[in-house]
């Protein structure tokens, strides 16, 4: 049995499909879980409930934590440590391996122009500090509590069913609505994006590779160094629209944040958009020899998959 905790997101949906290559028993756990494969087992559970998570993990060989929380620092501070502790305890109790799907928020700002698994953890933001604490909890449990686990880390991602990624929201979705695209801070900077299908395939493969555990992995991401303008222009060409866009500047975020709590939460993260943001997956690429999807191919597939037939 392989179990996905937080099974409703884009990565989890694709991951559920990929896991069928490795097991005939997939369990999906969420507040309101829905089957992805016809024979999936579904379990309704709140990840904040220790007993429910313990029960949901029982019988699992591998547990994938892919949950996403409301983009609100108060929620993150309150809920993430509780969720992580519940999951760690359940995995230890049932001798299940843990695979955590992570982001890059914990890296020091000076690491953003070229991130590797060895990049320094020194977050300058409140959300980054929460993420760093989760990583500390995992590796402390590996060292002191016999947990077997790994951290799989993604850049900002895009692709089918992605509802929160800013490439989808700011460019694909706006062009589809015949609106101007938007980019955050500086469209002249390089910005890496992980294709959601690549991420899911890699997480499933890593979870079923015994010697991949007890370390951090960057998920396969194109090494092409595209800027915001490159993405906007290419997506516009493929969607047959003009490459119109505006910059969501720090000032605009501050202004709009007065009216939108979600936009307000973006302000502290702009250090990831006002400089080059390059995500290096060489470690994974060298071990598994699975080339990441190119941006051209990923963009074409995303447009096709999100266009009604």
Image (cartoon, helix red, strand yellow):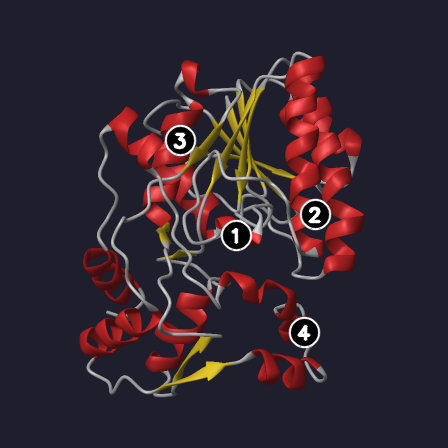
Point 50% across, 39% down: residue: 119
Where residue 110 is drawn, which disc sits there? 1
Of marks 2 and 4, which one's residue comes earlier in the chain? 2
Task: Give the residue at mark 4.
Answer: 264
Residue 37 seen in this snapshot: no
Of marks 1 and 2, which one's residue comes earlier in the chain? 1
* Quarter of the image where one finds residue 135: top right
174 to 202, vertically: above or below: below
Callout 4 secondary element = helix
Of marks 2 and 3, which one's residue comes earlier in the chain? 2
Callout 3 secondary element = helix
Callout in the foreground (1, 3): 1
Q: CA distance from mark 3 to mark 4?
A: 35 Å
Callout in the foreground (2, 4): 2
Task: Give the residue at mark 3.
Answer: 204
Task: Please provide percent x and percent y for residue 62.
Answer: 52, 22
Point 63% across, 70% down: residue: 267
CB of mark 1 within 8 Å of CB of mark 2?
no
Of marks 1 and 4, which one's residue comes earlier in the chain? 1
Where residue 129 is drawn, which disc sits there? 2
């Amino acid at each position: 049995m392989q179990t996905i905790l937080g099974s409703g997101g884009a990565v989890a949906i694709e991951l559920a499909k990929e896991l069928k290559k490795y097991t005939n028993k997939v369990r999906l756990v969420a507040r309101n879980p829905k089957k992805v494969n016809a024979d999936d087992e579904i379990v309704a559970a709140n990840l904040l409930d220790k007993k429910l998570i313990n029960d949901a993990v029982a019988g699992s060989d591998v547990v994938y934590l892919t949950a996403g929380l409301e983009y609100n620092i108060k929620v993150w501070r309150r809920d993430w440590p509780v969720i992580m502790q519940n999951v760690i305890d359940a995995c230890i109790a049932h001798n299940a391996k843990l695979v955590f799907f992570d982001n890059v928020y914990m890296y020091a700002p000076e690491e953003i122009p070229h991130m590797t698994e060895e990049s320094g953890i020194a977050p300058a933001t409140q959300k980054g500090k929460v993420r760093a604490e989760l990583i500390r909890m995992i590796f402390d449990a590996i060292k002191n509590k016999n947990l077997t686990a790994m951290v799989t880390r993604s850049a900002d991602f895009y692709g089918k069913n992605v509802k929160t990624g800013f490439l989808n929201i700011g460019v694909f979705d706006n062009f589809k609505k015949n609106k101007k695209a938007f980019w955050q801070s500086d469209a002249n900077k390089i910005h890496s994006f992980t294709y959601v299908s690549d991420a899911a395939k890699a997480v499933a493969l890593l979870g079923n590779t015994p010697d991949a555990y007890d370390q951090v992995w960057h998920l396969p991401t194109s090494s092409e160094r595209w800027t915001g303008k490159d993405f906007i222009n290419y997506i516009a060409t493929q969607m047959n629209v003009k490459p119109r866009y505006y910059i969501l500047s720090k000032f605009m975020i501050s202004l709009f944040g007065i009216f939108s709590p979600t936009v307000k939460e973006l302000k502290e993260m702009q250090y990831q958009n006002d400089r080059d943001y390059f995500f290096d997956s060489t470690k994974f690429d060298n071990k598994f020899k699975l080339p990441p999807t190119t941006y051209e191919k990923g963009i074409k597939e995303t447009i096709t998959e999100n266009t009604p037939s």
